[in-house]
Amino acid sequence: MKNVNAKLWLIILPLLFCVSLSSAQNTISVKKGYSPQIGTTVSMLEDLKSRVTRSVQNLNQDETDFLLDKEANRVGALVLHLAATEKYYQVYTFENRGFNKEEAQQWEAALSLGGNARERFTNKPISYYLNLWDEVRTETLRLLKTKDDKWFSKKVKGGSMNNHWAWYHVMEHQANHMGQIRLITKRIPK
């Protein structure tokens, strides 16, 4: 019976590998309702957010609040940092300004991270941070739908970057922190 099982696995494993490769193939495409370049960027932003979300959504409270060392940031704070960065670029690119006083009070600690964030962002479930990011993303998607590729190529008022580069930077920022989040979650004691 052992030989039969071993032979069966020799047949099944390559098939599973092929299936996993075919399902791992993703595409970047223009999201419906957006201009071509914005829609492509939206596709990439949504893919990154989905991957970050999948990597943290099942964390328990101890895992969400885990500190790798005394200078590190908690996973929850990092997710909120992604939301805060996206929120900043919303007001920067759509309204040509930085945070106002009320927005700064809400988002500045998450944007800056560090000691203040370590103290402030704890004892909340991962869903709290993901829900805030969902709210920010919903607004980003709504606002991007109102713009076209001509707007995307325009420079941000008073800045050296165009709107496309600004949203590329948001995406790049998310990819960088996705790696950091995954490193932290792999270091959480079992």
Image: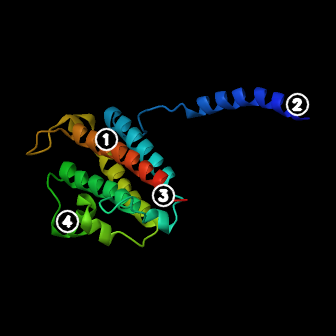
Q: How many marks?
A: 4
For discs 2 and 1, the disc positioned in front in the rendered view: 2
Determine which residue is flagged by label 4. Answer: 104
* Amino acid at the residue labelled 2: Val
Q: Earlier in the sequence, mark 2 or mark 4?
A: 2
Q: Earlier in the sequence, mark 3 or mark 4?
A: 4
How far apart marks 3 and 4 lie (CA) works out to: 31 Å
* Amino acid at the residue labelled 4: Ala
Determine which residue is flagged by label 1. Answer: 172
Q: Residue at x 11, y 45 (%)?
A: 157
* Amino acid at the residue labelled 3: Ile
Determine which residue is flagged by label 2. Answer: 4
Give SS at disc 2: helix
Q: Which of marks 3 and 2 is nearer the N terminus?
A: 2
Q: Which of marks 2 and 1 is nearer the N terminus?
A: 2
How far apart marks 4 and 1 lie (CA) works out to: 23 Å
Q: Which quarter of the image is occupied by the N terminus?
A: top right
Residue 128 point in image, percent of width and height: 43, 67
For discs 3 and 4, the disc positioned in front in the rendered view: 3
Q: Residue furthest right?
A: 1
Give SS at disc 4: helix
Name the image quarter holding residue 16. top right
Give SS at disc 3: loop
> Does residue 23 lie above or below 178 as drawn?
above
- The local crowd at label 2, few if under 14, some if 14 to 19, many if 20 or more residues have their Cα within 10 Å, is few
